[in-house]
Amino acid sequence: MEAVVQDVVIVGAGIAGLTTSLGLHRLGVRSLVLESSESLRTTGFALAIWTNAWRALDAVGVSDSLRQLHTKTKGANHEVRCVKRKLLLEALARELPSGTIRYSSKVVCIEETGYLKLVHLADGTVIKSKVLIGSEGVNSVVANWLDFKKPPFDGRAVIRGCAEFKSSHGFEPKLMQFFGNGIRCGCIPCDDYSVYFFFTFVRSSQDKEVEENPAKMKEFILSKLGKSDDHMRVTVEKTELDSIMCSPLRFRPPWQLLWGNISKGNVCVAGDALHPMTPDIGQGGCAALEDGIVLARCLAEALLQKPAVASKEKPEKEEFRRIEMGLKKYAQQRRWRSFELIATASLFGCIQQSNGPVMRFLREKVLAVFLSWLLLKRASFDCGQLSKS
């Protein structure tokens, strides 16, 4: 039986993939989202959502419900909330038409046939698509097809967790952060009963056993906290073992984005498939939300445009050219933005976790104001609305 041609196939039901799909849906374009897992991926527990990301959530119409569930953070002169990843993904998925997300659908390879892409799944299914978007993270098959290299390790790892308190934790709604001596850690309330924490550290050969054992992760963190605030210690102690995980940090060297193929023909990448970055400025998920809005806007404009009456090209070829130009427009808008975010995150990580009295003095006395200004500037970005009209 001949496979039905899909207008848009999105690989990966993460933040970028679901935002793109929902943005397209709001503009009248259907898409199919292929997710390799059996359900929504909720690893990572929570993430900081800054002003720039709230603008994206406003654009797709899911911001109000998320605001009601998460406490606004004080002290940043920005709208910052620590949002549970599960609730964010569910809010996006809930607004999509039934059947949009196809689970247990792992992409193994991509082929071309005329103006279409053939997407081969692990179960033998082949799906034809006019547009293919890769948003399946750092191990993206689509990014590999576009000749992006696999993102290298940063040399650090991060332990993340979320503590659930039986009664109100009583913490102030602010980020409590500590860094230096090779580590950076902090905790931030999501709501009155849950607190998210992170702990980044320079990896060594002796840490492998720690990274694979949640109980040892907790012991490792508590042994490294020193004189840090008691809030961090209490949060780690209260975290259940199934609510803690460790992962090595990867990032895409920013110069790869200057000449890399963010799009090629009718194929492009978004989210961590495009711009994996270290978590030092809390903008990875925010950038993925931005990607979704910009991509949906550029792609819908191309797909919904009426064919030129006087065109001598075949309809399939003309549509392919419109799609190609729409994805190029998206790539142009996201290339420098992605570059500056990755570069800023790398700079923050280097400065915040460096050892030595000279760097500590510069960090605390000289660079603090500059770093704060740079962080807030990155969070002030406006990706725009879904439609320019």
Image: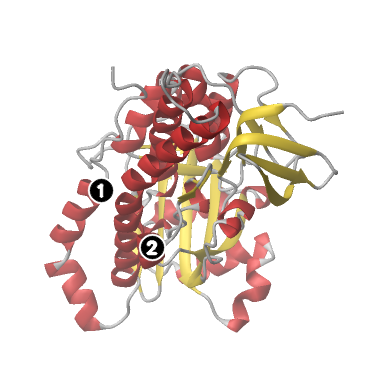
- Quadrant that contains the C terminus: top left
Q: Is residue 291 above or below residue 364?
A: above
Give me the residue at 35% from left, 66% from top. Answer: 346
Q: Foreground: 95 or 120?
A: 120
Q: Which residue, given by chain and number where applicable, does mark 2 sit on?
A: 259
Give me the residue at 44% from left, 33% from top. Answer: 322
Q: Foreground: 215 or 328?
A: 328
Looking at the image, is mark 2 or mark 1 nearer the viewer?
Answer: 2
- Quadrant that contains the N terminus: top right
Q: Is residue 215 visible?
A: yes
Q: Is residue 193 above or below residue 256?
A: above
Q: Foreground: 53 or 219?
A: 53
Q: Which residue, given by chain and number where applicable, does mark 1 sit on?
A: 378
Tell whether 255 sits left or right of 87.
left
Residue type (three-letter) at the residue carrying disc 1? Arg
Tag 1 or tag 2, which sits nearer the N-term?
A: 2
Give me the residue at 49% from left, 24% from top. Answer: 24
- Tell me residue 236's x, y (percent): 53, 54
| Tag 2 secondary structure | helix
How is the model colour-coded? secondary structure
| Tag 1 secondary structure | helix
Q: Is residue 289 visible?
A: no
Q: Are marks 2 and 1 in contact (CB under 8 Å)?
A: no
- Tell me residue 55's x, y (percent): 32, 29
